[in-house]
Amino acid sequence: MKRKFRHKARRVGLGALPVLAGFLLASAILRLGDGTAIAMASEIVRVTQAHAATPEQPEDEIATLLAALQAREADLDAREEELQAEADRLEAGREALALQLEEIETAELELRELLQLADRAAEDDLSRLATVYENMKPAEAAPLFEQMPPAFAAGFMGLMSPAASAAILAAMPADVAYAISVMLAGRHADLPEE
């Protein structure tokens, strides 16, 4: 956004009107009288002529001021371009971050769905295995449960029907059956009694 400064060339000196006024004033003083009037008139004429002959300096000052203003405007334009470029970079970064955030949220949602699917599959696998143990003869299932840690065995028995669990516990040695029974009872120990 460049502005062009135009200025009119000014004439050097006061111009015709002030010079004529000075001469008329000098003429009036001369007509009035004595030597004082003549001295005043000659001084007025001398000052008027000296002032009229002296070239004015404001054009140089205006040119200097104009150059300074143009340089300042160029600096401001350059700074404005820098600020606009920085604003554009910030906006591009903001858009990139928003896009990345959206991608992360989508990936997180997909991961949650996948974890839920895996959890359901694991639960289904445990239920199927518990059903297999439940359908086995208690004398065949008991040795398998004896090899399991009591907490692990109690987890499977919790998924089985009470009758099948009781039959398997009855086929085990008393100390192993007791440890598994304690685990089964401990899983519900904090429930309120009726």
Image (cartoon, helix red, strand yellow):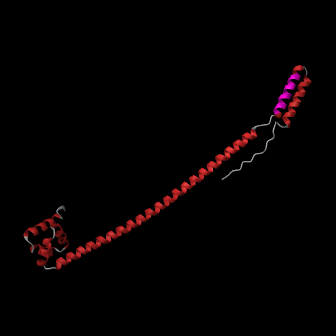
Judge left or right: residue 34 versus residue 13: right
Between 152 and 81, the one nearer to me in the picture = 81
Which quadrant holds residue 190?
Answer: bottom left
In the displayed structure, does residue 120 sit left or right of residue 158? right
Across and down, in percent, residue 45 comes to 86, 28
Image quadrant containing the C terminus: bottom left
Identified at 85% across, 31% down, the residue is 49
Residue drawn at the location 43% of the way across and 65% of the way down:
103
Counting from the top left corner in percent of width and height, residue 100 is at 44, 63
Residue 127 picture location, percent across and down: 23, 74
Residue 194 visible? The answer is no
At a point 49% along the width and 61% down the height, the residue shown is: 95
Residue 16 position (above or below residue 119): above
Q: Nearer the viewer, residue 75 or 112?
A: 75
Residue 122 visible at all: yes
> Could you tell me which residue is drawn at 10 percent across and 69 percent down?
176
Q: Main secondary structure of the magenta part?
A: helix
* Above or below, comparing residue 33 to residue 179 in the picture: above
Residues shaded magenta: 37-51
Question: Residue 136's image quarter?
Answer: bottom left
Q: Residue furthest left?
A: 174
Image side of residue 148 versus residue 84, left or right: left
Residue 152 higher or lower than 76, as above or below:
below
The percent coordinates of residue 50 (x first, y second) are: 83, 31
